[in-house]
Image (cartoon, rainbow, N blue to C red):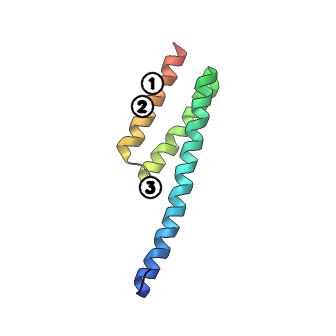
Amino acid sequence: MANTSSAKKATRKIARRAAVNKTRRSRVRTFVRKLEEALASGDKAAAQAAFQAAQPELMRAATKGVLHRNTASRKVSRLAQRLKALSV
């Protein structure tokens, strides 16, 4: 347990940041899951729309420090690759 007032404040700040990050991570996962479902169904139009929504969400998570930027880029790249394969 934190003893000093500054340590107690730091604990509160960490809890707030963790809650924000959890929300952002959950939001990203939701967008990616919607894209995965669209790809699985084979609906190109829905998959394209879902990709357009998921890509900025992934990059925003990287900007905010929820995901590493290379991780976000890799996920976008792989999803784009799967979307392209669907249209062939």
Where is residue 44? Give x, y as percent. 60, 21
Amino acid tagged 1:
Gln
Residue 37 lies, with reference to residue 44, above or below; the image says below
Q: Quadrant of residue 45?
A: top right
**Residue at image location 54% in from the left, 62% down from the top:** 19
Q: Quick one: SS at disc 2?
A: helix
Circles 3 and 2: CB distance less than 8 Å?
Answer: no
The image shows residue 38 at horizontal and vertical percentages of: 62, 27
Residue type, numbered disc 2: Ser
Tag 1 and tag 2, C-beta contact below 8 Å: yes
Can residue 53 be spotted in the picture? no
Place of residue 23 in the rendered image (x, y in percent of width and height, measured from the top left): 57, 55
Q: Identify residue type, mark 3.
A: Lys
Residue at mark 3 to residue at mark 1: CA–CA distance: 25 Å
Circle 2 residue: 77
Residue underneath mark 3: 64
Q: How far, Cα to Cα, is label 3 from label 2?
A: 19 Å
Please identify the residue farthest to the bottom as the structure is shown.
4
Q: Which residue is mark 1?
A: 81
User: In the rendered view of the protein, which quadrant contains the N terminus?
Assistant: bottom left
Between 17 and 58, the one lying in front of the other is 17
